[in-house]
Image (spheres, helix red, strand yellow):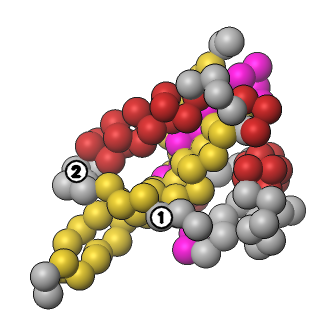
Amino acid sequence: MNLDWMSVWEDDVVDHAELAVVLARAFPHAGRIGGEQSWSSARPELRLVGRTDGHVVAHAAVLRRFLQINGRAQLVGDVGLVAVDPARHGSGLGAALLVRVREALCGLGMPFGFLTCG
């Protein structure tokens, strides 16, 4: 499997429709993802996208935010929209994606990652 990874800042994403298709397959009950909308609630800052033969097969999004912990604001990397194309489940692609997420969080200087999921 020829797998290419890329990190894309939200302002530079040009393929929202293609991302939305994969995310809609991965999250069939999300309802809000589709068409040109490739996010469900807060729009992310950074996308991590895995492609095979030019097609999106894995995706995760990162948004920097503050959480209250013991009464103090803590900067975290809010990680969401973590998805692997259902046709690729069980291939190890999800583990490879999470390695990329960790690298991205470290590259952004995030002391913590916070995985949000339904």
Examine the rendered structure and indicate whether residue 33 appears above or below residue 60.
below
The percent coordinates of residue 61 (x first, y second) are 52, 54
Front disc: 2 or 1: 1
Query: Could you tell me the amino acid type at mark 2?
Result: Gly
Q: Which mark is residue 109?
A: 2
Q: Residue 81 sits in which quadrant?
A: bottom right
Say which amino acid is labelled 1: Thr
Residue 101 horizontal side relative to residue 88, left or right:
left
Query: Farthest residue toward the bottom?
Result: 71
Magenta span: chief secondary structure: strand
- Identify whether 110 is placed above or below 64: above
Q: Please give left or right for residue 20 compared with residue 75 in the image.
A: right
Q: CA distance from mark 2 to mark 1?
A: 19 Å
Judge whether 14 appears above or below 2 on screen: below
Q: Position of residue 63 (x, y in %)?
A: 43, 63
Q: Which residues are magenta?
A: 42-56
The local secondary structure at tag 1 comes to: loop
| Left or right: 1 in relation to 76 | right
**Quadrant of the image occupied by residue 16:** bottom right
The structure residue drawn at horizontal position 79% and vertical position 32%, both measured from the top left corner, is 87
